[in-house]
Image: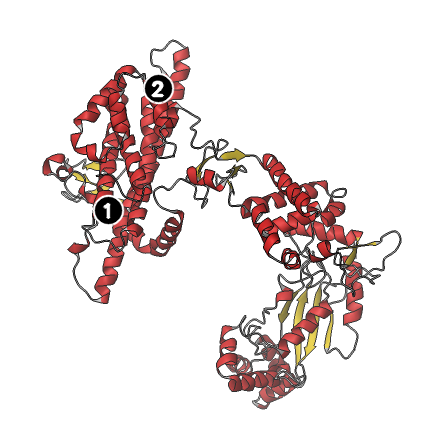
Amino acid sequence: MAGANGRLVKELKEVSKNDTSGVRAAPVSEGNLRHLLATVEGPSGTVYEGGIFEINVEIGKQYPFEPPKMKFLTKIWHPNISSQTGAICLDILKDQWSPALTIKTALLSLQALMCSPEPGDPQDAEVAKMYLSNREEFDRTARFWTESFAKPTSKDEAVQRVCEMGFDEASARKALEKHKWDESAAVNELLGAI
Amino acid sequence: MSMSDENEYYAYSSDEDDNDVFMSQNDDDEDDDTSLDPDEKEAMALENPNAAPVQSSFYTAAVPSSPTTATIRMMKTSELWPTLQQRCDEVTEMLGVSQATAMALLQSYQFSKERLMESYTNDDPETIWKRAGVYHRCSGNQNPEASAADMCPICMEDASPTSPLKAMPCGHAFCGDCWTDFAVNLVQHEGRASSTCPHAGCPEVVTQDEIQPALEQSHPNLWNKYQQFQLKAFVEANTLTRWCPGPGCERIAWAPTASAMDAAIGLAHCDHCDTRFCMMCGHNEPHRPVPCRSLQVWHDKCRDESETANWILANTKECPSCVTRIEKNNGCNHMTCQKCRHEFCWICMGDWREHDANTGGYYKCNKYDASQEGGSSDTDAARRQLNRYLHYYKRYHAHEEGQKFALKQLRETEQRMIQWQELSSSKVTAKWSDVEFLKVANELLVECRRVLKYTYVYAYYAFEHEPANSLTRDRFEYHQEMLEKFTEHLSELSEKPLEQMNRTDVVNQTRVVDRFLQNILKYVEDGMEEAA
């Protein structure tokens, strides 16, 4: 795979730019080009609007002849994304991958998936069922999740709320991170530690 | 086989008056030619067009190349390659397309030249090309947006005179290095030969025209592998070829035509690893008289029910008389308790005396009697269903075990024959030909157990809605009962120590059992209609 590293450098230069696409990615740590943290802005006009979603990206040895492995780190309520693990069901990240696609095109496809879910091919059956049977409740839940987990300020607000219950900021943040920003789980742990 | 054995057989046959109705017409022929040389008679049996077209182990033991299996051939992969090549050549010639296009077209028609040609006469060629992913290859139209590229979309390097882009017929172009990387990944990591254009969403297929220049020089072993994958796709898509299911065996069963396959009932025998299998479904042993479809359903069912069945089929049973736990270590179902000497049938656990001719019962335990179970509620119906399944499964399983024992015994006999052969060269009186009759008997026992096993699968589905007293079912069970009875008898005879064994008895029983085996298969395969 002679050209793969050269390509990766070019790709990262392109995808780390601050442009209007709403998708970005950068290495998690210096020197390792194969582990990236990507962000996707929730498309406007959708229940994800205003949210910034973090995605873990791993680039395998066979890249670009195999798709990059992507997973949502930010909790999201979407029929094709697991509400528990963040695993994504998208054809171009599986058998429809092509070596002519890039990390950026894959992230843009994720953004497109957020605009138009495909409940017929669900990753999360429970979410898909709600999407099909009770669209109002789905919209409400998805907006609530966007507010709670994907807002740039939502983390700070959560820390503040926990602090208001009488814990110091450092341990509140630590507990929230540990429990993936689930406030009640974090509070439970903090209470248990007393 | 000596002349005297033959004559004794005919004497035996005429003693069995009660079986005449169910004997095949071969009987009459042979009764008339008792003066014939035995070899000639065997030849006649083979040529008899009415005989079931299958190799009987009894006959094939004497005549190794049975004409019935000659139609299905086992091939090495290298032998099949020219067949695929020739088929491509024919398509190339008839349609005026390249070899690579011919291969892609054939692939989308499961390698059937006839279906491809038929489609060409009926359908619009563009539709066929698009379906096969060769639209641009055949029409010569490039994607307009694709032709102007000057950067390889895979490595994102600009094209240069030293590394020019090489385009697919659709116009999507990639540099030589990336083509090689693409081909290496396809063959080595994805393990297949078929792929579409590296451009996202382009349905044009990549063919040997692109792979060969990318691999042949730089990775000759992978180029070789690519061709193997093409051949694999051919074998798997083609209904007239099948990989030998023998472990690690890479031979291919090949039938020249569909009618040749039908004539052989799909029975294939690998001369390389000695596996016999069904070419139609790939099951690793012949499964007459059950059709492939029913066998598949049966196996699925057994997987679902295995918990229950396992519980019922614990490896040991209690002696019905003294309650001692008994482990079955031989193929015969006639059990004698070591402790109390009670004799019973392993299958129905009944007294063995009731299986005797004197009681008019012979071998009763192949019949499932639904009338014993009353009740009409859903629970009762479910229990009846389960009991019916268990009835057949127990017998299926018992014969499967019997088949294993018979196979073990056969291997032991073969081993003994080899030892005797070695000894005979050093002037010991025993000769391997002295026990050949035992090998023939054991081979037949393996086959009978196998067929009996599948008769229970067959019966399970064939008589699902048939009343207990239906004529076809009665007759089928009669055939089954006869085969079972004589198989048990032969099993018992052949399990005796060699010095107590009556050779003539075994030879005669072998003959008779083989006849019953052919009878039941013929009865089923003729649609269970027989001349009264």
Which residue appears at 57% of the width and 73% of the height?
A80
Q: Mark 2 falls on what kind of element?
A: helix
B347 with respect to A81 (left or right): left
Q: Categorize mark 2 by other alpha carbons within 10 Å: few (<14), some (14-19), many (20+).
A: few
Q: Residue B255 carries which label?
A: none
Query: Is residue B501 among the parts visible in the rendering?
Result: no
Query: Is residue B47 among the parts visible in the rendering?
Result: yes
Q: To which chain does the residue with label 2 belong?
A: B
Q: Mark 1 falls on what kind of element?
A: helix
- Across and down, in percent, residue B446 comes to 34, 34
- Across and down, in percent, residue B32 comes to 25, 21
A149 with respect to B140 (left or right): left
Front residue (pair B274, B451): B451
Q: Which mark is residue B40?
A: 2
Q: Residue B472 carries which label?
A: 1
Q: How far apart are marks 1 and 2 (CA)?
A: 36 Å
Q: To which chain does the residue with label 1 belong?
A: B
Determine whether B40 is above or below B519 in the image. above
- Across and down, in percent, residue B58 comes to 34, 28
- Across and down, in percent, residue B203 comes to 67, 60
B517 with respect to B203 (left or right): left
Of the residues shown, which amino acid type is indicated by label 1?
Thr
- Residue furthest out toward the right: B161
Front residue (pair B460, A135): B460
Of the residues shown, which amino acid type is indicated by label 2?
Glu
Which residue appears at 40% of the width and 20% of the height?
B418
Q: Categorize mark 1 by other alpha carbons within 10 Å: few (<14), some (14-19), many (20+).
A: some
Front residue (pair B407, B30): B30
Determine whether B32 is above or below B522 in the image. above
Q: In which quarter of the image is residue B481?
A: top left
Task: Choose the circle earlier in sequence order: 1 or 2.
Answer: 2
